Every structure is written in structure tokens, then in C-alpha cells.
Amino acid sequence: MNATARSPERNGVRLRQLTEAWGSQDDVTLYLGRCQVDTPPTVVSKVWEHIHKRRSQAGKVVDFGAGDGRFAASGKYLRYVGYEIDRRRCGLSALPKRATLIQRCAFSEEVSDADVCLGNPPYVRNQDLPAGWRESATASLKKRTGVALSGLANAWQYFFLLSLASTKPDGLVAIVIPYEWVSRPSVRALRCFILEHRWNVSVYRLRDDTFDNVLTTSSITIIDKNSVDGRWKFFEENPDGGVRRLPSESGGPSGVVGYSKRSEMATGTAHAKRGLSPGTQEVLTLTEGERVRSGLRVGSDVVPCITTLRHLAFECTAITEKVFRSQFRDSGIKCWLVRTDREPKARLRAYLASVPASKYETATCLQRERWWEFAMPGVPSLLIASGFRSSFPKVVVNAVSARAIGAVCGIYGVPRKKQAEVVKALRALDLSDRIVPHSNGLRKVEIHQLNTLLGELSTSASGNI
């Protein structure tokens, strides 16, 4: 046993010392708890298979975020060094003599002599990263690579860049990360860094059932620094465990739909915006029953909103008054948004005052002078779901002047006389192999991708939309 076992008390004291600069204990506990997703043995074996196809034997292997050190238990290497800040994860792990686990933050020292960096970096959302950890990791990576990661970067992106910085000029990176890294805008800086160095990339999309309770499509991503012709290859795992080559990162011959910022679009063309995130839908959006019980009036206190299109029949192409009443008001769906574009009247003030503090203890609400006050969104011409499983997301004419909330996005600037035409044109598009899968067959179209599609429609249509 190469890892040293320690008492729970000593482990806890040591952990607090290592993380005291990260932020509050609650933030640290949340982060560490979400880091711990064990890698299935089959995936560990596949990672090593990909490594040995490119290196018959690895020299020094480094694993940032080693957990219980399971990647050390197989593979051919001369030396394995794993970093795991939570000693309770690895204090009793039996490891080969060539392997060592170090209780230390992976970003606390500069490794530059790794022949191979491997592992399964933690998947923690950017919102859940301790501020001190993020600042320290960002500064370290910027100093070493010159790359400034997006503020929307999740934890695994920091570990991915760390692995690239820590391997030798001819080294190899083999890690398990979300497949969406190949196209998401938040990972653009990292992709550009790889492209600038012309390292070869092979990405193997894993089946959705690879990890239990992880809602993202995973991949084994290989970056080979020893091959510098800049080739990117994409593969998909078959049910029998084999792989097939994909023509592009999205799986289709046309590749991923491009991204267009609104500032890059022609003046006057239709454009998309994300649905409002009011801070807490639980109390700032209401069902019809909640509205009535609180005595809130339509128009003066609340306005119509659409929080989901999931239950709406795909054949429905417009939310009319009749559809809104039967499918939203009478169905108990959250469909009313509190008005914040003017000082609340007595009824709405009373409702807001009655909300327990526990209901709005979110980062967004607590940052506001008045926890409930947000900028009211405009009324979109069309409403569209961001997620879909068929060929295109549900998109409908917004005939009730509802606001778009959450995963329902808005398309603005479509003249009334062309709204039905645009809905029909969008529904005729097939994005099934032009959007990178998110998880379990679900795809999510980004706002900038919608802008690209709207721009293409505007160009092909007679006159702007």
C-alpha cells in the first residue's frame, strides 16, 4: 500500500488547510462533493488502450484529480503520480509500487515533465466553483499558457488545460471529458490553443449510459503532441464496444451549425435571445392556481410567460389564447411572470413580502438590492425550445405576447405577417446531425446558432425576416 492512511480527524484538518483560500466551507464542500464521480473500470481500460496504441509504454504518468487512483491499477508505465486533495478518497487505496498519490491541489505546483496526463477531471459547473480556487487556477494557467479561459468554463476545462501545460513537447493527454468541448463557445480558447500548436486530436464519443446520473455525453479525448499535422478525428462508440469514424464533430457531413453574434448580423434581421432567468422560477413565476390564491391580477401584477414547451404537441404551431388557456393555465403549468417594470401594486407587494427567504436564497437574487427585481424582457415574435430530440426544436408563434423563460428562448423582430412562414421554414430544417449531442439523445441549440439559421433564412427569403 503506497498511499498513507490517516485518521478522519487529521484528514479533515489537512483538507481545511489546503482549501482555506478557496472560499467558504460550504462552497468548498459543494465543490468537492461534486468532484467525486467514479470512472467505470471499462472506461479506465479504454483510456489505457488508446494510450498504448500511441505509446507502447508510458514513462511518467500524471493524473490530476486522481480520486482513488484507479487509473494507476492498469496500464504500462514507469511511474504514476496522482493528485487528490481529498485524502478520504485515496487514504486506503492499494496501489502498485510505481504509483504515488499526493494530497495536494493539482494547481499548487508546476509539472512540466509528464509523458502522459490522463484521468477523469471533475465535472463541476462554473457556478459551483469556489471563487478562490477559480482565481488561483486561472492565474496559474494564464501564466503558463497565455490562455484565459471563459468565465463560463466548468472545472474540467481548467484540468484539461493543466494537462496540456504539464506534458512534455512530445507528450500525450488522454482524458474523459464532455463531448461538447468540440463545439461549445465557452471552450473556444482551449480549442484555439490546440489548433495553434497543430497537435493531433482524436475524440471518441461514448454511449450515454457510460456514467450513471451524469447528464452529459462523455468522450475519451486524446491530444497527441508528438503529431503536429493538426488532424482532428471524431469517433462514436457502437453498442458492441467498437467505434465508427464520424465525418464531423456533429456526426453529419455538414458539420456543426455556426455561431453568429447579433452584432455580426445585418441590421433589421430577426434574432434570438435566451429565455429570462429571473433568479428563482419557483416564486417569480406562478401557476394559475398560485396567481388566484395570491390575488394577483393579470396585466397589473403578472403577465403571461412560457416556461416550457415540453408538453405541447409538436403539431401545434402557435400559442393562441385557446392554446394558452388549455395547455398552460388550466394544466397547472407555470405561466405567469411577476411584473417588475414598474413599482409593484399593493397586492404584488404583499405577495413578495410573504415569500420565505429560503425560497429566494440564490446567487442571483441575493446580489440584487431588491431580491425580486429583474429587468423585464421584451415580447418575442416566436418562442422556441432550446432542447430537442427530433429533427428540430419546437417553435411556435407567440400570439399571446408571452415572455420567454428559462429553457424557452425568444426570436425577436419577425413581422407579424411573416411569423407563420418563418415557423414553417424553421420546422423544415433538420438539425439532427448538425448539433453536438448533449445527453441521452438530447440536443441543445445555442442562441448564436439560432442567429446563424435566422440569417440563412433571411438571405434565402424574399426580403428580410
Image (spheres, grey):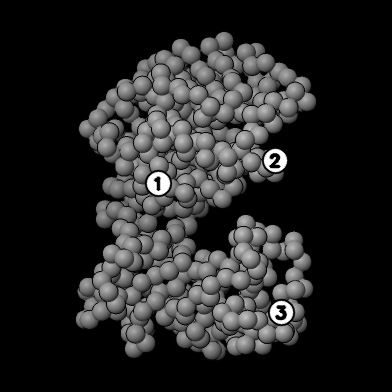
Residue 452 in the image: above or below residue 313: above
Residue at image position (36%, 21%) is 168
Residue 89 percent coordinates (x, y): 66, 28
Residue 197 in the image: above or below residue 369: above
Foreground label between 1 and 2: 2
Residue 203 in the image: above or below residue 373: above
Q: In the displayed structure, does residue 212 sit left or right of residue 14?
A: left
Mark 1 belongs to which amino acid? Val
Mark 3 closeness class: few <14, some 14–19, many ≥20 residues within 10 Å = few
Query: Which residue position holds label 1?
Result: 187
Residue nearer the viewer, 110 or 143: 143
Q: Split into 4 quadrants, where in the image is the N terminus? A: top right
Of the image marks 1 and 2, the number of the one nearer the N terminus: 2
Instruction: Write down the quadrant of residue 206 in the picture.
Output: top left
Residue at image position (24%, 30%) is 228
Mark 2 closeness class: few <14, some 14–19, many ≥20 residues within 10 Å = few
Instruction: Write down the quadrant of residue 147 in the picture.
Output: top left
Mark 3 belongs to which amino acid? Arg
Residue 242 percent coordinates (x, y): 40, 37
Alpha-carbon distance for marks 3 and 1? 43 Å
Pick out the residue farthest to the top: 97
Mark 2 belongs to which amino acid? Gln
Residue nearer the viewer, 319 or 185: 185
Residue 170 visible in the current orientation = yes
Mark 1 closeness class: few <14, some 14–19, many ≥20 residues within 10 Å = some
Residue 44 percent coordinates (x, y): 51, 29
Foreground label between 3 and 1: 3
Q: Which mark is residue 25?
A: 2
Query: Which residue position holds label 3?
Result: 349
Check disc 2 and report its element: helix, strand or loop: helix
Quick check: marks 3 and 1 in contact, CB under 8 Å? no
Of the image marks 3 and 2, the number of the one nearer the N terminus: 2
